[in-house]
Amino acid sequence: MADRFDCDNCKESLYGRKYIQSDESPYCIPCYDSLFSNTCDECKELIGHDARELFYEDRHYHEHCFRCFRCDRSLADEPFTSQDDALLCNDCYCNEFSSKCVACDKIVMPGTRKLEYAGSTWHEGCFICHSCEQPIGSKSFIPDKDEHYCVPCYEDKFAPRCTRCKKTLAKGGVTYRDEPWHKECFVCTSCKTQLAGQHFTSRDDSPYCLKCFGSLYTTPLCSTWMSFGGGKYISFEDRQWHQPCFTCSQCSVSLVGAGFFPDGERILCRDCHSNL
């Protein structure tokens, strides 16, 4: 009598029937599918042994059930992504969730290089300087209303220019007579010392340090110079005095606020003049 060859599950004979061996045990096709096949996450039916099975994470699908949730396109051989457990082809995902470039109005595809600024998105190659029209990329830029400029173009177009050297002032500088200057360009007309942060004066619209102005334009008296900024002084005709120096030439009494009498190169108080 021949040995029995039965399905390990239903015990029906497998002679003359297709079967599948699993863990050294034979199974008829219906039993094998019911015991070992996965259930399709889409249609909830078993994925038979002879069907092409696709899976994503812990979910299994028939090939014909593995489709885009929006457009129903087969994803079997297409790139896709998952959004809230729904499978989407790249086109549908981009149309629904990806940003559009504000320059060309095309989708910024996931994984492509992009630039985001002030809530807007650009393809890297679309974010260009408004002036030279070259891509800005990762370089510094300066916004002006709805336009963007690379730093060299912005400085050339908008930045003030130094009155002396005519080059742009990127930052800092000083203002003299409503005109901009680089700090290193704003110097004494005579000695070329930088005047930024220093006391200075001017003559004929030209700036001078106090030392040079005193040497060039004030009158000598009492072995000292009438330097600008040195305190109050008194003028009479073409002569000037420091207040402490404005004294009677004979008795040395201070003449500040008092009457005096010129006597040639001398100045005299009332008493000394009356005794002449």
Image (spheres, helix red, strand yellow):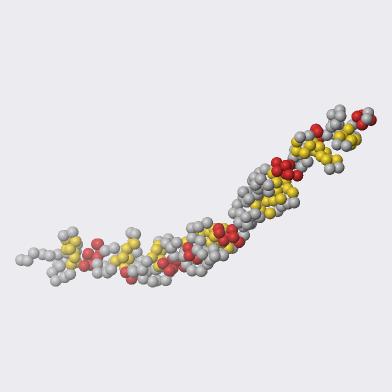
Quarter holding residue 56: bottom left
Q: Is residue 99 visible?
A: no
Quarter holding residue 259: top right
Quadrant (top left/top right/bottom left/bottom right) for the N terminus = bottom left
Q: In the depicted view, which residue is nearer to us: 158 or 77? A: 158
- Residue at image location 74% in from the left, 49% down from the top: 203
- Residue at image location 78% in from the left, 41% down from the top: 219
What x and y, as percent, mark residue 24? 16, 60
Quarter holding residue 227: top right
Whether 253 is drawn above or below 74: the answer is above
Whether 26 is drawn above or below 163: the answer is below
Quadrant (top left/top right/bottom left/bottom right) for the C terminus = top right
On the picture, is 83 further left or further right than 12?
right
- Residue at image location 47% in from the left, 61% down from the top: 114
- Residue at image location 68% in from the left, 54% down from the top: 179
Q: In the depicted view, which residue is nearer to us: 56 or 209? A: 209
What x and y, as percent, mark residue 67? 37, 69
On the picture, is 41 further left or further right than 229?
left
Whether 189 is drawn above or below 267: the answer is below
Q: How many marks can you see? A: 0
On the picture, is 216 further left or further right than 156?
right
On the picture, is 116 further left or further right than 261?
left
Q: In the depicted view, which residue is nearer to us: 77 or 20? A: 77
Please identify the residue farthest to the right as the structure is shown: 274
Q: Is residue 33 visible?
A: yes
What x and y, as percent, mark residue 269? 89, 31
Please identify the residue farthest to the left as the structure is shown: 1
What x and y, as percent, mark residue 206? 71, 50
